[in-house]
Amino acid sequence: MSFTVAIIGRPNVGKSTLYNRLLEERKAITDDISGVTRDRQYGISEWNGKTFNVIDTGGFVLHSEDVFEKAIRRQVRIAIDESDLMIFMVDVTTGITDLDESLAQELRKTKKPVLVAVNKVDNTERSYAANEFYGLGFENLFSISAMSGSGTGEILDFVTEQIPEDIENAVDIYADLPKITIVGQPNVGKSTLLNALVGQERNIVTDIAGTTRDSIHTHYNLYGKEFLLIDTAGIRKKAKVHEDLEFYSVIRAVKAIEEADVCILMIDAISGIELQDLKIFSIIEQRKKGVVILVNKWDAIEKDSKTILEFEKKIKEKIAPFTDVPIVFGSALEKQRIFQAIDKVLEVYNNKQIKIPTSQLNDVMLAEIEKYLPPAYRGEYIKIKFVTQLPAKTPSFAFFCNHPDYIRTPYKNYLENRMREKFKLTGVPINIFFRKK
């Protein structure tokens, strides 16, 4: 097992800024309002030749009935259980608060090593004021400025000294796993789906839209299936993106699409497929990611024998011309057909890895071309002589011909449809190129 460090503290003391500093990247969203981080985030830090896991947590408030703060409390306690050492963050500008005192009591119960990071110490006066925090009862105290980075080297030195020599380095053991991103509009049920699949409250779920702000990575290893699940902030219409924070959440969601191999696009069965859903589908298609559409909240719909067929037809009309996409109707809340959706996702992932032998490609596709030859253009006959698959992450094919510039979109669509019919390419956007023979 590798060494794990959790960053704990009350809201708005700078935990995510320190987390980004330790990881040397902008992974967590930071803002100067409290409650930005809600779910726990994981990353890997490297220092002095050693690597360790870092967990960023939401702001801990002990006695609160606020729906988010209660959920964050559960998340923080999970992070404390998972960690080997805790960085207890406080803010020199406020001094010791009641929330700091109550959290210090919680941390003392764990018997795990705790270091106190007094943040925002950026002048001599504040450096003296930081000594007040010895009153929390912890021996190891560091004055830092997470924003500028001063003092973080000393924290990293201390942390790496605590790592036993025989413990293995933290590595990205998930690099080769399929990456599945769950996307959709706010409040469509993305976090509910993730929690239903994993079987625990990995993410905070409430009935308020916009709960998830960062993209959260979860390792799934159940029932003989293993992959990374990425839950994202809901992508809402531009007119409704009021705060900077939400703007960054949308950017992060688009980044999560880019990181994925396959996306689960969740659609609300009650409101049906909307323009915003089509925009998200378009982002997935443009970035050449595999896609499965999951129509969620299907249990809340009155239906008859034709409802699924009609709903499916409506979706395919709107997503055309790329209609070779699996569509699953289910309910994340009732765990209805969610595992069927995962089976479809893994099928699409395998389709995306397809490698078709050149001989087979030519035997099949040249015969299809003979059935329907490319239309002549300006009196010039077009002859396609050879087809090959190109080395690329997305299935890509080159058709060699005498006049590549003369082939129009309808014929390109014909070839794509024949490719999809003859080879397993469901759910995968493909590239077709025409090249001079």
Image (cartoon, rainbow, N blue to C red):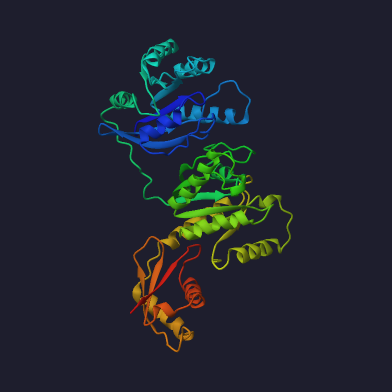
Q: Is residue 25 left or right of residue 105?
A: left
Between residue 93 and residue 86, name the one nearer to us: 93
Location of residue 114 in the rendering, given as x and y in whole percent from the top left corner: 39, 20
Quarter of the image with the N terminus is top left
Residue ID at (52%, 31%) = 75
Location of residue 169 in the rendering, given as x and y in whole percent from the top left corner: 30, 36
Q: For the view shown, which residue lies furthest in the bottom direction?
A: 379
Residue ID at (43%, 60%) = 350
Quarter of the image with the C terminus is bottom left
Residue 48 lies in what quarter of the image? top left
Location of residue 22 in the rendering, given as x and y in whole percent from the top left corner: 36, 32
Q: Is residue 344 visible?
A: no
Q: Is residue 98 left or right of residue 396?
A: right
Residue ID at (61%, 65%) = 316
Residue 397 lies in what quarter of the image? bottom left
- Placement of 20 over or under 119, stated as above or below: below
Q: Is residue 418 visible?
A: yes
